Amino acid sequence: MTNLESSRAVSPLAAFSTATISDALDKLGRPGSMLGIAPLTDDVRVCGRAFTVRYVTGGHPVGTVGDYLDDVEPGRVVVLDNQGRTDCTVWGDILTAMAHARGVGGTVIDGVCRDVERALGNGYPIYSRGRFMRTGKDRVEVAEVGGAVSIGGVNVKNGQLLVGDADGVLAVPLDLEAEVLEIASGIHEREERIVEAVLAGSTIAEARRAQGYHTLQRASQDPSEAAGSALGS
């Protein structure tokens, strides 16, 4: 099974770009796009359920950076809330090697990573605020595993669906996956029609007007109304 096939087995939303899913979330008036969290490289995608870990500044004595990876199931996405810190890392070479070997879906960090050569060589997806070599040991410690975390300004619950591509990563609310899928499908279909029209000689203004482009992402009061509008019903 290819990575894309595996991702689609988790959710059909894996077939859509984060841009399309973000527009669907806008339509529903719900946040999800993680500001400032970017992939190490543009040729990776991720789609999986969050395995959440929250870090805090180390106490006295300082606790550990955690051995949680033993409990992460294949396909899950490790989501690390390091409070956006860029002065020390909570993910490196050992974790990348183990996660890749076990089929973990990827890692998302509100913070930085290090030892990126292995991740790049293995094609292991990491989304973070950047890379920096200094260890988090004796600087931060695990405060909670499996609880709610904040990543790029978005609250993420354990088990929540994450989708990432070259544009970044987002979280889909657990209670809205079906609605987001329906709306994203409609947006994708309409935008493909716009592309086909302009390549066939239409002006962009005409093509966009025909498909209601400028209101595709506009929030509606009723999620069912939003889905119907996006699908043109």
Image (tube, helix red, strand yellow):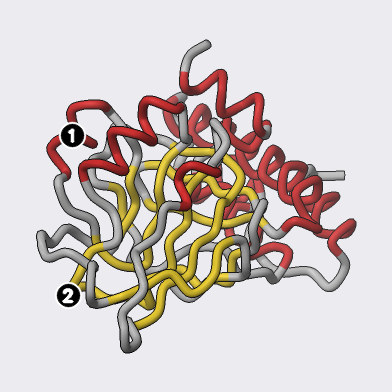
Residue 166, how many percent across, how many down? 34, 43
Point out which mark residue 118 bears.
1
- Left or right: residue 69 versus residue 134 is right
Judged from the image, the secondary structure of the residue bearing numbered disc 2 is strand
Disc 2 packing (10 Å; few <14; some 14–19; many ≥20): some
Amino acid type for the residue under numbered disc 1: Arg
**First of labels 1, 2 by sequence position:** 2
- Left or right: residue 229 versus residue 96 is right
Residue nearest the viewer, comparing 97 with 37: 97
- What's the residue at 23%, 67% (across, down)? 137
Judged from the image, the secondary structure of the residue bearing numbered disc 1 is helix
Furthest residue in direction front, as rendered: 61
**Quarter-wise, where is residue 152 in the image?**
bottom left
- Left or right: residue 141 versus residue 181 is left
- Left or right: residue 128 versus residue 180 is left
- Return the residue at label 2: 87
**Quarter-wise, where is residue 172 in the image?**
bottom right
Amino acid type for the residue under numbered disc 2: Asp
Residue 212, how many percent across, how many down? 66, 52
- What's the residue at 58%, 57% (across, down)? 171
- What's the residue at 36%, 30% (across, down)? 100
